[in-house]
Image (tube, rainbow, N blue to C red):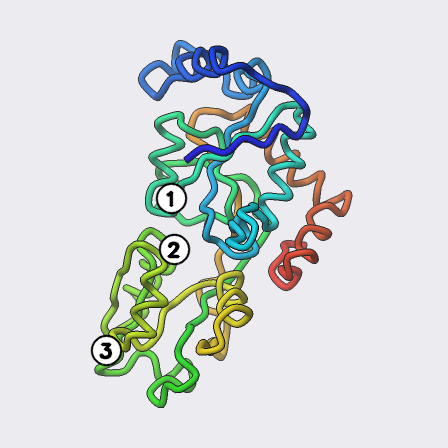
Amino acid sequence: MTWHWMGSGVGRSLAVAAALAVAWGGPSVATELPPLLERIRAAGQVRVCIWPDYYAITFRNLRNGQLEGIDIDLSRALASDLGVGLVYVETSFGSFMDELEDGRCDVAMFGVGDTPARRARVDFTQPYLVSGIYAVTARTSRRIRNWADIDQPGVVAAVQRGTFMEPVMRDHLKQAQLMVVDPPQSREIEVQSGRADLFITDYPYSRRMLFQHEWARVVAPDMPIARTPYAYAVRKGEPEWLARLDAFIATVRRDGRLEEAARRHDLLPIVVR
């Protein structure tokens, strides 16, 4: 699903939008097109991939249907700085690299963990957030009281497919069973149903569980585990666009917009200083 936010006041008719969709094209015609940054400026819009269920990052508030989060604020700031309109393209951690490679969006802005496996397919900006991993279990659980209780025989730990937590937990767990679930909402369902004892997530999503679910309890490791930088991702082969995004991150760090957005969404503890 695609959502338009015309922050700069730049509009386009449906006919022009259709022509631009053809002009943007996919990887097969990339060598025949000008650099992506030039195409964004010519089109008058930037297409931003988001996962709309990422609390405090890119989250659709079900009470009013509005998107909110640090990367909603920052994507609007990016579009404003570029002087173009903004189009949101909904994706997930399991498919965003396909979206970038196929030319369906110009940048993924939803707290994407910068990992070696992902770097093999896409390029990353400098980081702006960093988070380790956390466990979410039921308050009533007698089996999971602290982090040491997780990797034990008979324990089932759930992770969302495509997240950086999946390979981390494959390496971490020696005795417990790993359950990879999809779609993301099923992680909570698996724990509530008793099919999983816990699920693994990051700092932002753990805040959602505490704020919105009375049944949930967050278990933090004794020492940070798998601290992962979060950055914006772009398709490979677009150095000018990558440099422009790096400059944007440097600017919002310097002028306070990053810190302001992080404070608004309770993410100050994980901001890269």
Q: Quadrant of the C terminus?
A: bottom right
Badge 3 is on which residue?
A: 175
Q: Is residue 18 above or below residue 115?
A: above
Q: Amino acid at mark 3?
A: Gln
Residue 150 in the image, given as x and y percentages of width and height: 34, 79
| 1 or 3: tag closer to the N-terminus | 1
Residue drawn at (25%, 66%) of the image: 179
Residue drawn at (45%, 33%) of the image: 2
Q: Is residue 109 above or below residue 27?
A: below
Residue 8 in the image, given as x and y percentages of width and height: 68, 26
Q: Quadrant of the N terminus?
A: top left
Residue 133 in the image, given as x and y percentages of width and height: 45, 66
Residue at the bottom extreme?
142
User: Dot 3, how many residues are within 10 Å of its Cα: few (below 14), some (14-19), or many (20+)?
Assistant: few
Q: Amino acid at mark 2?
A: Phe
| 1 or 2: tag closer to the N-terminus | 1
Badge 1 is on which residue?
A: 118
- Work out how far the residue at label 1 is from the one at label 3, CA to CA, in angstroms: 27 Å
Residue 250 image label = none
User: Dot 2, how many residues are within 10 Å of its Cα: few (below 14), some (14-19), or many (20+)?
Assistant: many
User: Dot 1, how many residues are within 10 Å of its Cα: few (below 14), some (14-19), or many (20+)?
Assistant: some
Q: Amino acid at mark 1?
A: Arg
Which of the pair 67/134 is nearer the observer?
67
Kindly check if marks 1 and 2 are in contact, taking CB atoms under 8 A apart as contact.
Answer: yes
Q: Secondary structure at mark 1?
A: helix
Q: Is residue 21 above or below residue 185?
A: above
| 2 or 3: tag closer to the N-terminus | 2
Asked if one can make out residue 155 in the rendered structure from this viewpoint, the answer is yes
Residue 164 image label = 2
Residue 66 in the image, given as x and y percentages of width and height: 57, 46
Kindly check if marks 1 and 3 are in contact, taking CB atoms under 8 A apart as contact.
Answer: no
